[in-house]
Image (tube, rainbow, N blue to C red):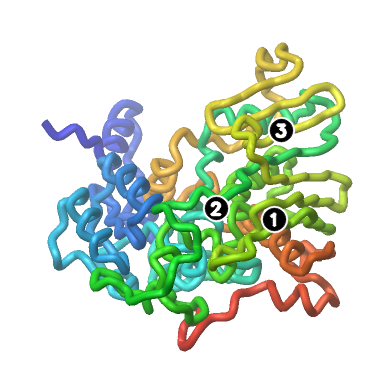
Amino acid sequence: MNTTFTRRRLLTAAAATFGAPLILPGRVLGLDGAVAPNSKVRLACIGVGGMGTGNLKSFLNDGRVQVVGICDVDSKHREAAAALAKLGAGDLTGDYRAILARKDVDAVMNATPDHWHAVIATAAAAAGKDLYSEKPLGAGIADGRAICRAVEAHKRVLQCGTWRRSGMKTRMACEWVRNGYIGDLKVIEVAVPGSFRVSGGFDGTEPNGTPPPEIDYNMWLGPAPDAPYSPARMHYNFRWITDYAPGYITDWGAHFLDVAQWGAGMDDTSPTEISATGVVRRTKGIYNAPESFRIEYQYANGTRFVMVSSEDTKAWGIRFVGTKGTIFTENDRLETDPVSLRAVRLKDSDVHLFESKNHHTNFIDAVISRGQTAAPAPVAQRAATLCHLGAVSAALGRPVKYDPAAETFGSDAEANALLARPLRGDWKLSV
């Protein structure tokens, strides 16, 4: 039985119920970039290893979505994803540009390594595609801002993969903080993993070799610096190499610092002083991202965040510390001190934050309605900026001062040189 309940049927039923004429806004008629009524959102997935596969499965479970294309530089990943989506060889490619050139693609899911995010996202926006883009928004502060400009210029919907914004307990914690139920906010403590959880049994000292036939290694490198092939470099383990990402500073920091910003009400700004200390890196092999660190963030209004690496799995998450209590949140965990905070129910006059019950569903809702996403580009940019600021301080080995309005380090030329990642060869960001 076909259980799909289309928007046209819903609107028709509503009009009949209330005896009113059916007047449809332009966006419902398929104008202003919206999907036409009675049509499914035609989605293509770029990068389908790891999180990409998880995202693909989530979208396949939404009856409003039709997955029409798969792109990955690893043909084994493509074929596995094609089997899930029941697609043929003609819908598979190793080059994202073939996906963006298709007129039958409304939106793309981008779960490529961090160094690809800005190139693909800006090109997708310029091609008129809405975007579900994995975190962090960009691999550098300037890269993320370029994505924001492209999304705004081309009137695209973007949902960043910082999915904790769609978690009920995360939202409740942030609402309690925003409404003063823990008193004045003193500090937000964030703990992320320390030692790298490396996939495939590698340690980063493996010898270089020849890429296997199923991998287009030059395309995998894309805009990143040229480097010899090693199986330890690719797929999940790109995170531990600073040419692509600064380790857990962005891998988990992008999630947890995003929640910290939300709870502190800092979605539209950034800290002004940042200091990374206790930075430890491996001394052998290609894994050179910070593996141990403490990063302090100071905002102009006195708000302070502290992010530390920790081997204690129970500490991983976000702790809001106030003058009258504390709240710890991470995914399904929500702990308060005093326990009585758990009984708090918001008043009508309280701040009520944007509610999304499912991150992927919320994205499709917004694609159809041209409405709001839980993690739009400007919000995701400020969350990613926190990560990059910490990485810059760690790279320079000293504190840095930042101008949130200009999104620069003022007269600090050494730090400003790290605002954007250089792009190899002919790769560029689209306008």
What amino acid type is highlighted by mark number 3? Arg
Judging from the image, what secondary structure is the residue with disc 3 in?
Answer: strand
Callout 1: 10 Å neighbours few (<14), some, many (20+)? many
Q: Position of residue 416 (x, y in %)?
A: 75, 75
| Residue lying at 43% horizontally and 63% vertically, measured from the top left | 232
Asked if one can make out residue 311 in the rendered structure from this viewpoint, the answer is yes
Circle 3 residues within 10 Å: few <14, some 14–19, many ≥20: many
Query: In front: 310, or 149?
Result: 310
Mark 2 or mark 1, which is nearer the start of the sequence?
2
Q: Residue at x 76, y 25 (%)?
A: 326
Q: Position of residue 1 (x, y in %)?
A: 11, 31
Q: Are marks 3 and 1 in contact (CB under 8 Å)?
A: no
Assign a secondary structure to mark 2: loop
Q: Quadrant of residue 310?
A: top right
Which of label 1 and label 2 is nearer to you?
A: 1
Q: Are marks 1 and 2 in contact (CB under 8 Å)?
A: no
Give the labeled residue for mark 2: 376
Specify whether residue 32 is in view: no
Amino acid type assigned to the residue bearing label 2 in the image: Pro
In percent of the image, x 48 and y 48: which residue is there? 371
Question: In terms of sequence position, does the residue under pointer 3 or pointer 1 come before the other?
Answer: 3
Instruction: Judge by depth and name the residue closer to the eye, 231 or 428.
Output: 231
From the top left corner, tell me how far across and down residue 381 is, in percent: 62, 58
Q: Is residue 391 left or right of residue 168?
A: right
Which residue is labeled 3 in the image?
319
**Number of the label disc, if any, that sits on residue 386:** 1
For the residue labelled by badge 1, is the local secondary structure a helix, a strand or a loop? helix
Direction bottom: furthest residue:
425
- Circles 3 and 2, Cβ within 8 Å, touching? The answer is no
Crowd rating for badge 2 (residues with CA inside 10 Å; few <14, some 14–19, many 20+): many
Instruction: Say if 16 sits above or below 366 in the image.
Output: above
